[in-house]
Amino acid sequence: MAKKPSKPQKKAVAQAPAKKEAVVEAASATKKAPVKIAFKKTNLTKILIVAIALLVLIPLLDLLIQFSIIGRYAAFVGQTQVTRNSYEKELERRYGQAIIQDLIVEKIIANEVKTQNIAVNEERVTQELDGIKSQFSGEEEFQEILKAENLTEEEVKARIRLQLGLQEIVRASMTPITDESIQSYYDQNKQLYEGQTFEESKESIRKSLEDAELSTKGDEWLNGKLTALSADNNLTLTANKQYKFFQSINLIGKLFGRN
């Protein structure tokens, strides 16, 4: 005869659905729970540092690229380029010696002015500038000429200072302008002073003769300095661009004024 199932087994079968429901409710509760992402302070600091670094580095990289291209090329012509090297070579070929001569002359005068401790009067600079401006119809025309010559008023004043400095350098070697020489000039050029007596023209003639002698003396002084200045000092000359064994020692000596 078969045995009947015991009561505890029935209870176990009856409790199984309850456990299943509990598992489903737990899973459902887990799904509904909001997910929270926590950022640590250290992570935020790192992100901020990276952002600042990018803000600094990107403009610097852009600047580096721009100056690299500008440093290499002088112009763009369609799909071709004019290199800065070819541009500078052509400039030197056409105007190099004239420009270097002017720069050498400026240095010679400036160095002598410094050596002799000559102070150029700024009032005289202004007077000379006003004299130049008076040759034009007005300030507007003067500024237009400056623009056409690619000059500024300050550069014109700098040239005037150099010229006045040169005059002061050679003034000591000048012979005084005598009344006899003024009279002689007046007699030979009366047509230039028509309607003016000798006395009325005297100071004007004196200044003209003095300016002429200052110019002559200045040219003589400069020519003497340029002659004494060795051609070896002009590094734009083709001969001085060529490699010479141990020439660096000589160049370093010139750089630091030791020869």
Image: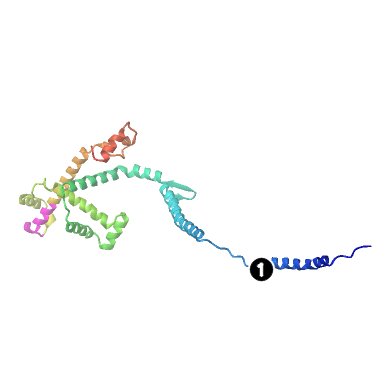
Q: Is residue 228 magenta?
A: no
Does residue 36 lie above or below 181 as drawn?
below
According to the picture, the residue beneath numbered tag 1 turns out to be 32
**Residue drawn where x is 35% and y is 45% of the image:** 91
State the extent of the magenta-drawn residues as a range: 195-208
**Residue drawn where x is 23% and y is 46% of the image:** 107
**Residue 174 percent across, percent down from the top left:** 11, 46
Magenta span main SS: helix
Taking depth in this image into account, of 258 and 92 the one nearest to the observer is 258
**Residue drawn where x is 8% and y is 56% of the image:** 202
Q: Quadrant of residue 29?
A: bottom right
The kind of residue on which mark 1 rests is Lys
Q: Is residue 52 left or right of residue 10?
A: left
Taking depth in this image into account, of 165 and 17 the one nearest to the observer is 17
Considering every residue shown, the one lying at the far top of the view is 245
Q: Quadrant of residue 232?
A: top left
Any part of residue 190 in sight: no
Q: Quadrant of residue 18?
A: bottom right
Q: Secondary structure at mark 1?
A: helix
Considering every residue shown, the one lying at the far right of the view is 1
**Residue 207 percent across, percent down from the top left:** 12, 54
